[in-house]
Image: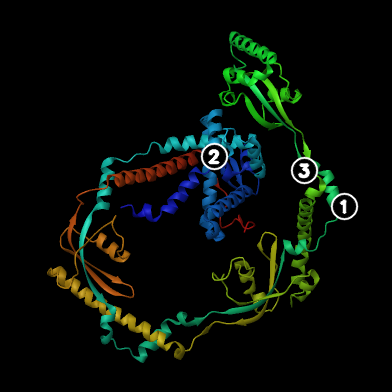
Amino acid sequence: MFEFVRTHQRLMQFLLLLLIIPSFALVGLQSYSSFGDSDSDSDSTVAKVAGQPITHQDWDAALRDQMSRMQQAFGERFDPKMLETPEAKQGVLDNLIWQRVLAATATRKRLTVSDPVLQQTILGMFPNLVGADGKFDSKLFNQLLAAQGMTQVSYAARLRQDLAMQQLSGAVQATAFTPKTVATRLSDIGDQEREVQELLFKARDYAAQVKVTDAMLQDYYAKNAKEFEIPERIKAEYVVLDSAAAAAQVTVSDADIKSYYDSNVARYTTPEERRASHILISVKRDAPAAELAAAKAKAESLLAQARKNPADFAKLAKANSQDTASAEMGGDLGYFANGMMVKPFEDAAAKLKQGEISDLVQSDFGYHIIELTGIKPAQVKPLDQVKADIGGEIKKQLAAKKFAELAETFSNTVYEQADSLKSVADKMHLQIQTADNLGRQVNPAVAPTAPFNNQKFLTALYSTESLQNKHNTEAVEIAPNTFIAGHVVDYKPVTKRAFEEVEAIIRDKVTRTEEIALAKKAGQEKLAALKAQDSTTGFGASQTVSRVKSQGVNPLEFDAVMKADVSKLPAFVGVELPQQGYALYRIGKVVQPANVDQARRTSEQQQITAVVAQQEMLAYVDVLKEKAKVKILKSVASSSVGSDSQ
């Protein structure tokens, strides 16, 4: 019943992931910022949504993002080739289009997300940033965002848009439902039990009847020549130019490090942080004058009390502040750096000395009374502390520049001095290495990180220029900042193993084939007889099977039994068992179980509804795509998307 959902569960999860994945993670900041900028004449445009472009760069970035997520999800089991297929690339483009369509629709329908919902979402996404005291670690949050090239403002904007899109998709999927009668019928099919007996015709029981002749062996050898081929093989020399080779040819002096430090001292400076407590009397700026006046009067009264007894500030905050989160902690807001608080509040706190209490500060939230409780001065890391990091950074930059120079030299030299790799190795201080038994395709038994085990390189080795003309291959980019060139040392063409060498193997294969054929013939004759006249002779004990209780049953046998026509009982079905023989099954009874698993049935109904919801969403997106006049301008086949990210 639920074979497809169960068998393709990972596929279904992947499809669902594509629908609900945060849009900014797939589309990227550049895509959002350029969404409103038409570029109809750009050669890089691969598709359009409502007249707005999706560029080759957007597509490539989305592919890299998807690869990164899959690497995190699958770990060592991840194979980059999963995303190299035309189908995978088309799927990423389709998803980009879906996201653009949904984003445009959410904007058109004015779907919004309130600040409290946004804040709760962030807290839920980063629970580890909430300390035991209940305070959110904004400093660490900013560091995490900075590592991704984001600020709180840009992150919040993108998350807000993503939540709006989820409102839209959630509303559509919430309309899906499964009638109970349909779910019950499907569950009944899944629960249906069939009482089965088995009669085996084992191939080995017919061994004595098999007569294998020399002609049969020679015939098999001739008709199955591919089985006995020894594939063509190449022995090749190769050289690799990568970032490490470039880095080995650059040096960084102390003067370079000092100059870099002086020019970038801000990078090694921890800015000043201030700690403050506050009392908030909430009132909107556009509130009626009477409300503003009442709030201000209350705030002025509290200000007077705080200045009269500064030591009681925490008590006053706890009893009166309408910022409930900080009020419980005596108004304490913790340490914050410049840019982390709203402008009027931040400016006032910046002017206070430690222990001072501000005048009333009005913000969009109301009136604040601020007490500065601590100052952490800005700190500059000394040069000695960051010298190694700076040296590494400079060397990385110089190596990148050096690599660009070397790459051109490498490519030119392997082409101009095509008879050997010695010239390029000597000129660029590279090591000539050797690899043997190289076929036309990547060898799955060899580590994928081995530079010679790359499809582009193997194709170049087997080219006419390399194989027949004995020239170097071209410089092949096998990874970012990694080039390889090779030279064929020896070539062994396809050969065929001698008949005498494989005669025993062939005899065994032919014998097994004949045994299975005899077993199948006997089984089919018995099947015809049983359909004419029922008999239980030779059948084993009865066994009950169902679609929910198939453990331990051979899949071929199970499929045959469950697909058998049981409109008339007993029913009989036969199935060939590879390498084993033939089996007959007698189905004597078909019933529903006395007791059903109601919890499982409820779960199955939910599964069906989930699948229906996904179909509803896909159908809705298709309608939106039509309205948005989506156009795909470049096919996967004509695009080099992803080629630079492998």
Which amino acid lies under the numbered mark 3 shown in the image of this protein?
Answer: Tyr
Is residue 518 visible in the rendered structure shown here? yes
Q: Residue at x 27, y 44 (%)?
A: 598
Compare residues 124 and 610 and report the one nearer the observer.
Answer: 124
Q: CA distance from mark 3 to mark 1?
A: 18 Å
Image quarter hosting the C terminus: bottom right
Numbered mark located on residue 125 in the image: 2
Between discs 3 and 1, the one toward the N terminus: 1
Three-letter amino acid code of the residue under disc 2: Met
In three-dimensional space, the C-alpha distance between marks 1 and 2, rounded to whole angstroms, equals 45 Å
Q: Please give the residue where the numbered disc 1 appears in the rendered image.
A: 255
Residue matched to label 3: 268
Q: Residue at x 42, y 81 (%)?
A: 224
Report crowding for label 2: few under 14, some 14 to 19, many 20 or more residues within 10 A (C-alpha): few
Q: Residue at x 63, y 26 (%)?
A: 332
Q: Residue at 38% x, 44% y: name it.
A: 610
Q: Position of residue 370 (x, y in %)?
A: 68, 21
Q: Residue furthest top?
A: 290
* Mark 1: secondary structure: helix
